[in-house]
Image: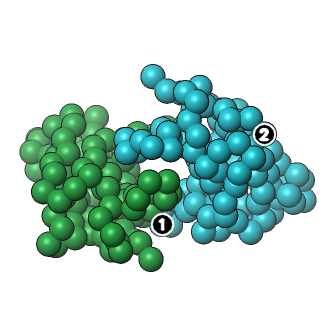
Chain colours: A cyan, B green
Amino acid sequence: DVKVTQSSRYLVKRTGEKVFLECVQDMDHENMFWYRQDPGLGLRLIYFSYDVKMKEKGDIPEGYSVSREKKERFSLILESASTNQTSMYLCASKWSTSDYGYTFGSGTRLTVV
Amino acid sequence: GNSVTQMEGPVTLSEEAFLTINCTYTATGYPSLFWYVQYPGEGLQLLLKATKADDKGSNKGFEATYRKETTSFHLEKGSVQVSDSAVYFCALSDLGNTPLVFGKGTRLSVIA
């Protein structure tokens, strides 16, 4: 089975900190995605990457950046964490030519205090 | 742009009841349609999919039929179990690498 692993399940950070959320997949998927999930808002796309060193903004990129130096790893960076970034963050991946949908990680619940 | 609208929850059913969760979509092309499920404390899992009109996706007793004429992909199950309690997301993907667009999710609670 494809595995998408998010490094932390729960994270508590202070306002203003730089935060790194890591995501690793083990199936050589080209495409990787970061979403945030909030009650009543569903999943919203933050950033995605079609391949190594490539990145595209999603619907809500403000306050975030990403890094994809290796194919298996896609990092989400909160440059200066704020309380409105408290959320569940979900990483996903898929093959570029696949129509089989995404494989998701278990999520990181981030609390910014 | 593309969008997905699904019925708001929460939905509470008794065990063995019939389930329908409505999903309609707006897309410029001919999208693939998906249902994902999120069990408590977990990420999303693909439940079923359909890639063209009149296709029926099915898995674990759940079914959904791709209806182009009504732009719908309603999720159904004939007899729900307590273990089906989860949040269900309808989603679409339009051509190749375009990111999935999700509905807001519908929380289902099944009581014994």
Report which residue position mark 2 lands on.
Answer: A69
Q: Chain of mark 2?
A: A
Q: Earlier in the sequence, mark 1 or mark 2?
A: 1
Q: State left or right for residue B42 relative to residue B112.
A: right
Q: Quadrant of residue B78?
A: top left
Indicate which label's residue lies in the foreground, 1 or 2. Answer: 2
Q: Which residue ends up furthest to the top in the rendered image?
A: A1
Question: Which residue is rendered at x = 32% and y = 51% of the image?
Answer: B34
Marks 1 and 2 belong to one chain: yes
Q: Amino acid at mark 2?
A: Glu
Question: Which residue is rendered at x = 44% and y = 77% of the image?
Answer: B1
Residue B100 at x, y percent in the picture? 46, 57
Q: Chain of mark 1?
A: A
Q: Is there any visible trace of residue A111 in the rendered image?
A: no
Question: Which residue is rendered at x = 55% and y = 62% of the image?
Answer: A44
Residue A17 — which label? none
Report which residue position mark 1 lands on.
Answer: A40
Looking at the rendered structure, the secondary structure element under dot 2 is: strand
**CB under 8 Å between discs 1 and 2:** no
Q: Quadrant of residue B74?
A: bottom left
